[in-house]
Image (cartoon, grey):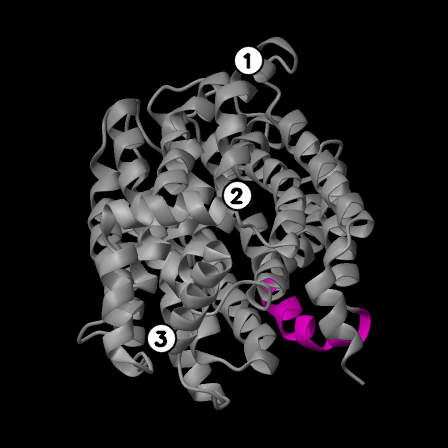
Amino acid sequence: MDCSNSVLKESTALTEQAPPKPKSKLNLWQLWNMNLGFLGIQFGWGLQMANMSAIFEHLGAHAHQLPILWIAAPLTGLIIQPIVGNLSDYTWGPLGRRRPYFLIGAVLATLALALMPHVSELWMAAILLWVLDASANISMEPYRALIGDLLPKEQRTQGFATQSLMIGLGAVSASVLPWILSHWFGVKSISGIRKIPQNIEISFYIGAGLFLATVLWTVITTDERPPKNLEVFEKMQEKKGGLMGSLQQTWKVLQEIPPTMRRLTYVQLSTWLGIFCFFLYFPPAVARNIFGAVDQTSALYSSGIEWAGLCFAVFNIVCVGVSFLIPPLSRRFGPQTLHSFCLLLGGLSLISVAVIQSQYWLLAAMIGFGAAWASVLSVPYSMLTGAIPVGQKGIYMGIFNISIVLPEILVSLCFGWIMRYWFHDNRMAAVGVGGLFLVIAALLMTQLTFPVLNSSTKSKP
């Protein structure tokens, strides 16, 4: 009886600190302002994903060493995401609830991006990757929760699709920038031993400025709604805010995961096993397996990395286009069916990459992966938002993203051995395995049921 009363009181308090209802729809310009910071964040992510494995190889790393060099990034996310999510749930100040975290993360990420071109040892690059990933997570996690804070239920899919659009634009420009600098402006793309090419160096400088500028734009142009009852909110802040409160809340929420979130987690685990294999190995795989480079200081290797950047640009362009289609397709077929189809398409595309011999056919394969990427970046979060408690979106989003970092940690710890003794450093084989995991995720999506989603779907005409 006491336990039930405690849960009821807590639920009431959380409802009291929720934004006023009903929430009004935002116009297109407001949606653009709110999500513009995501463009800069993803520009930084895009530079990281397209170039870090190549940077590690420029600094002397072998293929089987790449996974462990990436481990700092997911380990950081495992710790930071739920803590920052909970802190942002119970923060209120002059900049609001989520915006202080956008800004702090942007400043730190800008410093990491600006310093990355100056590394000369593997350990230096690994540490800066840790800082960059931690900073991007500080900015990104509250951003996911902002959609639920400001948008009414019927506009959330559009909100996450707009985020996907910004992610696509940021990633396209980041992926293609080194190629543009090399082919249009004559910037050197060949490096010496333990030296990062100049076109990648300049790209990181541009990324640093764009990350900070776009996040600042969102902070300045987007207002957050204050808690309905500030006095109640401050009491909840004392009880559940701070570092220790965040750790306690994380443990508590882990024991109270809603069914929809639990089932989506199974899909996410397999999804991100596949996606991380792709991001980890695709750029050097193109240089080694498709272009035939044997030396990372050669012009052939640089050409392969640049072509991999063009492939990244293609799948992100597709992501931008598909992001416009996700809301109507989700309403027409249901988000579960749509997500399953996109995952299957992406998985088959990556499996085909493992046997493709032509650099041009790689571009065709990126179309299917781009559709999957658009769905991965929006549909699971849209499904989750309606299934988590009001007022705790930050911590739930942070914990949900553990389903992204856990498979990344698993790949980082285990895949180096697999690469060395099973695949004999065949980087393209790892990409094909990533496709297989996406196919498994698609099958899981068709087999699981989502009670919150299904009930809401049935209520619609």
Q: Nearer the viewer, residue 359 or 6?
A: 6
Of labels 2 and 3, the one closer to you: 3
Q: Nearer the viewer, residue 230 or 211?
A: 230
- Report the amino acid beneath label 3: Gln
Q: Which residues are magenta?
A: 319-333
- Report the amino acid beneath label 1: Trp
- Residue at position x 52%, y 31% in the image: 284
Report which residue position mark 2 lands on: 404
Report which residue position mark 3 lands on: 17
Disc 1/disc 2 C-alpha distance (Å)? 21 Å
Residue 321 inside the magenta-drawn segment:
yes
Assign the magenta stretch its main secondary structure: helix
Of labels 1 and 2, the one closer to you: 2
- Residue at position x 38%, y 49% in the image: 249
Q: Nearer the viewer, residue 11 or 167?
A: 11
Number of numbered discs overlaid on the protein picture? 3
Of labels 1 and 3, the one closer to you: 3
> Is 80 above or below relative to 226?
above
Which mark is first along the chain, 2 or 1?
A: 2
Q: State which quadrant residue 53 falls in.
A: top left
* Element class at badge 3: loop
